[in-house]
Amino acid sequence: MSAVPLRNNKAVAAASRSVTVLGATGSIGDSTMDLLRASRDRYRVEALTANSNVQALASLAKEFGARFAAIADPARLGELKDALSGTRVECGAGESAVIEAAARPADWVMAAVSGAAGLKPALAAVDRGATVALANKECLVCAGDFFMQRAARAGACILPADSEHNALFQALGSGNREELVRVIITASGGPFRTWAARDIERATLAQALKHPNWSMGQKITIDSASMMNKGLEVIEASYLFTLTPDEIDVLVHPQSIIHGMVEFSDRSVVAQLGTPDMRTPIAHCLGWPDRITGPATKLDLAKIGQLTFESPDFERFPGLRLAYDALRAGGGATTVFNAANEVAVAAFIAGQIRFGAIARLVEATLQDWTRSGNLSPLSSADDAITVDQVARNRAATLLPQIASKAS
């Protein structure tokens, strides 16, 4: 049974909703706090967390009257206490404090802690049956099967906060599961959409960070440039909506106006459109099952003039192909895919490898994992974290070999 709410299965909206934001100072957190700022009478902030930005976290905690604030870096506890001195805000530091923030009694939790570090806090919110707006891909990429199973057992409601998955969530409401033919995730194509393979290979960090449509963090922007991010979204959609790889297509759509489409058995295709602004899908999650007023720019299709579409190029962007391979392999392969990609992106940022080597390192790590025969299903967060760490270590071991190879 899916923990994603089905059509006509609306909950009763509370007059006032308590919220927790995990990752309040990141790009998703910024958008969430912006929406909360515009609807202060509707929401009360229970807890906020951040990775290391103490001053920004303390400022938000004071502005919104949060009851609890947690900084992930345990060495910054004293700094956080000083910043919150004279307030009634409780505070903590380290992984346990971030998990405590998620476990506190908020009706709605934004799970926006990036990386595998976001898994245990998100599970803490899931296990108490909260409504969780999921912006952390790794929760599903690394642990999709048991994450969704635990959500269903606890009666938690999982709302997709990514623009593409939120679009699919809205479009899926137009039909029943047995009527579905496929879902279509759109991709902008990133900054290298029209580049030749040899130029993509040698792309610089500055070039990779020039996304044509979206303003995002460094890691996700680089993933968009390599289309690894779209691969992660394919994996996420599979677990979130219980879809096979063959039921998920990717379509390059440079304007980023259509965010997702669903095709049904009568050949109707239902799409969700909107300007490229993360506040739109977050607002949908924040108000669900109702809709709240969002601050994004009104969509003006006449001004845009035209919408164009292209098939994805798996040769120039092999990361997308590798995501499908990992999804079909199962048994922790998607966890390995994500971990190896994080190592590869960090190496690219550090100038250790070329842009084109990101996919080669991921592929080498996946092949090594498959050859080892470690393809048993994951059954716990600790299993996923162990596989994640082993894959990171293996990717780091393979890194010098990949770096030394000329394209």
Image (cartoon, grey):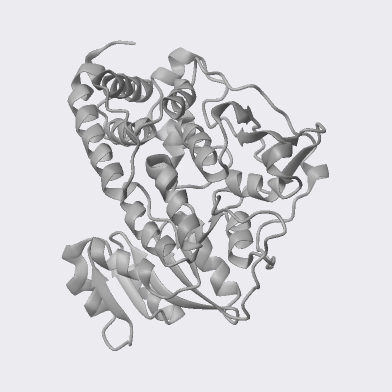
Foreground pick, 265 / 14: 265
Q: Going by the image, does 215 lie left or right of 276?
A: left
Q: Residue furthest top?
A: 406
Residue 90: tell me if it is visible: yes
Q: Is residue 203 left or right of residue 188?
A: left
Q: Which of the pair 53/273 is nearer the observer? A: 273
Residue at x-position 69% and y-position 67%: 290
Percent x, y of residue 46: 43, 77
Residue at 41 percent of width and 47 percent of height: 146
> Residue 195 appears at what percent x and percent y?
53, 19
| 405 vs 317: above or below | above
- Residue 267 position in % (x across, y down): 80, 31
- Number of numbered callouts drawn: 0
Residue 177: which quarter of the image?
top right
Give the answer, above or below, for where 325 lies relative to 296.
above
Q: Nearer the viewer, residue 261 or 149?
A: 149
Is 267 situated above or below 283?
A: above
Q: Quadrant of the C terminus?
A: top left
**Residue 406 relative to residue 302: left or right:** left
The residue at 63%/29% (across/down) is 252
User: Who's the residue at 28% across and 39% down the image?
Assistant: 388
Q: Vertical placement of 296 versus 144: above or below?
A: below
Q: Is residue 9 toward the left or the right of residue 243 in the image?
A: right
